[in-house]
Amino acid sequence: MTDTNTTASPSSDPIKVDIWSDVQCPWCYIGKRKFEAGAAQFSGAIEVEYHSFELSPDTPVDYAGTPSEYLSEAKGMSPAQVAEMLERVTGIAESVGLHYDYDSVHQTNTVISHELLHYAKAHGRQIDMKERLLKAYFIDGRHVGRIEDLADLAAEIGLDRADVVRALTAHDFLADVKADVALANEYGIQGVPFFVIDGKYGISGAQDPATFTQALNQILTERSEEKIA
């Protein structure tokens, strides 16, 4: 089950938007806001589904350092370069209404959070869960790599906490995460966010809202032309 933008156009089926992203990807949260702004300017129906992508699959769940230290280690950047990069991304986040707090971020492994997103999708709450996880990681200083912490976040949006613990402990949705990652590899997706619109057009990165609106309108135009033909 997927979540749907209810700006419905009864004359056409919803346009499917598949989004690959990671919970600890700063551009993914920014891209989510920009996509939402672009979708708000579109008059048709949109069906959104999020897919798993792990930027740092080798990161330990309880990474002991800070995000700055992690970036220095993973990318070979100097502390000054990392500080400059984080200042830039924080400023861009502010421009779309997101108040990143890197001093409170818990760098972690996100595979379990992706399993939770698939659980939430199965219960019709994937969009809400995605938003809660991103906010938890970048703004609230919450941990998104441990089952008990994730169950707390799931309960906040109305999911059954005990059942979430059960599903995540049993890794009921790990195969779905791996399937998403495999599909990303098949598509040649190497960075996120990555948007696939109507199975036809790929948009990479946190593009301006108008880019998304234009792509959605293009699909609508093509559908109209196909009906005429």
Image (cartoon, rainbow, N blue to C red):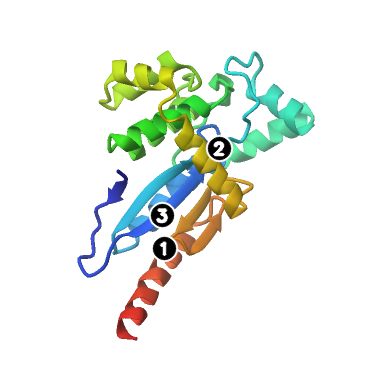
Q: Residue at x 55, y 37 (%)?
A: 26
- Amino acid on which the number 3 mark rests in the picture: Val
Q: Residue at x 57, y 24 (%)?
A: 109
User: Neighbour class for label 1 at 10 Å: few (<14), some, many (≥20)?
Assistant: some
> Can you give x and y, in whole percent of width and height, for residue 61 in the image?
57, 18
Q: Label 3, on which residue? A: 17
Q: First in sequence, mark 3 or 2: give its number.
A: 3
Q: Quadrant of residue 219?
A: bottom left
Q: Quadrant of residue 151?
A: top left
Asked if residue 217 lies left or right of residue 191, the reply is: left
User: Neighbour class for label 3 at 10 Å: few (<14), some, many (≥20)?
Assistant: many
Does dot 2 land on a helix, a strand or a loop?
helix
Tag nearer the camera, 1 or 3 = 3
Q: First in sequence, mark 1 or 3: give its number.
A: 3
Q: CA distance from mark 1 to mark 3?
A: 12 Å
| Tag 1 and tag 3, C-beta contact below 8 Å | no
Q: Label 2, on which residue? A: 26
Q: First in sequence, mark 1 or 2: give its number.
A: 2
- Amino acid on which the number 2 mark rests in the picture: Pro
Does dot 1 land on a helix, a strand or a loop?
helix
Does dot 3 land on a helix, a strand or a loop?
strand
User: Neighbour class for label 2 at 10 Å: few (<14), some, many (≥20)?
Assistant: many
| Tag 1 and tag 2, C-beta contact below 8 Å | no
